[in-house]
Image (tube, rainbow, N blue to C red):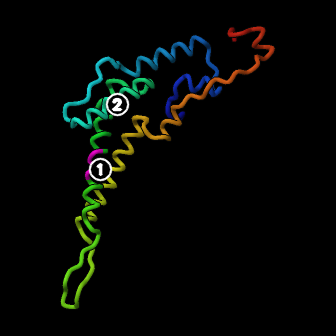
């Protein structure tokens, strides 16, 4: 299995593959078609006003980087929804103590707070959901590094390249 397909710019600049100019042009055209349209990117109606504002900011940045299209609208909306839910759960956790003290025949006893444990599980689930969505959108550092295109390094042409140029 070859793994995920990488952008042609990345392959050419890292020197991992040797492509003819025609193959490079075909891959660039194909990558542009696959990306999808970007003309009418609007936040979904089920997002709150704050989520819509953040949606517009993030989508504009991702479109500028050629990493986002109308096909990704729901992915970004789900990311923002899980992110805001995560923050709400974290606020709730700060208000609830992890243990509570109850009176028994033997005196006071410390027991775990079931509401706290439930919120911790919900927080972990939302964190995983948010992280997976951000990875799919290229918002976390590891996915950005996979997509980053190194700067082209100027090098001297070999004698063969000087003679034959791009006719290879």
Mark 1, secondary structure of its residue = helix
Residue 127 in picture, x, y percent from top left:
35, 50
The answer to whether residue 152 is magenta is: no
Q: Badge 2, how many Cα within 10 Å: few under 14, some, many 20+?
A: few
Sequence order check, earlier mark of 2 and 1: 2
x, y percent for residue 131 = 39, 45
Image quadrant assignment for residue 60: top left
Q: Indicate whether 39 appears above or below 59.
A: above
Answer left or right for 5 relative to 109. right
Q: Is residue 79 above or below residue 29?
A: below
As drawn, the label of residue 135 is: none
Q: Are marks 2 and 1 in contact (CB under 8 Å)?
A: no
Whether residue 86 is in magenta: the answer is yes
Residue at x 57% of width, y 11% of height: 22
**Residue occupied by mark 1:** 87
In this rendering, is residue 95 above or below 9? below
Q: Magenta segment range?
A: 84-88
How far, Cα to Cα, is label 2 from label 1?
19 Å
Q: Nearer the viewer, residue 51 or 7?
A: 51
Residue 141 lies, with reference to residue 119, above or below; the image says above
Give the secondary structure at mark 2. helix
Q: Position of residue 147 (x, y in %)?
A: 51, 32
The residue that mark 2 highlights is 57
Determine the residue located farthest toward the bottom in the rendered image: 106
């Amino acid at each position: 299995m070859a793994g995920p397909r990488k952008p042609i710019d990345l392959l050419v600049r890292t020197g991992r593959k040797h492509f003819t100019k025609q193959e490079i042009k075909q891959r660039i055209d194909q990558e542009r078609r696959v990306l999808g349209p970007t003309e009418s990117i609007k936040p979904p109606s089920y997002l709150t006003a704050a989520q819509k504002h953040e949606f517009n900011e993030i989508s504009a940045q991702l479109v500028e980087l050629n990493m986002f299209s109308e096909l990704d609208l729901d992915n970004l909306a789900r990311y923002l929804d899980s992110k805001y839910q995560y923050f709400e759960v974290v606020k709730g956790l700060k208000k609830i103590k992890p243990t509570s003290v109850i009176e028994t025949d033997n005196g006071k006893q410390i027991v775990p707070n079931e509401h706290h444990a439930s919120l911790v599980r919900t927080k972990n689930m939302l964190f995983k959901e948010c992280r997976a969505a951000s990875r799919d959108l290229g918002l976390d550092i590891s996915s950005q590094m996979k997509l980053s295109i190194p700067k082209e390094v100027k090098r001297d042409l070999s004698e063969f390249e000087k003679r034959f140029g791009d006719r290879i």
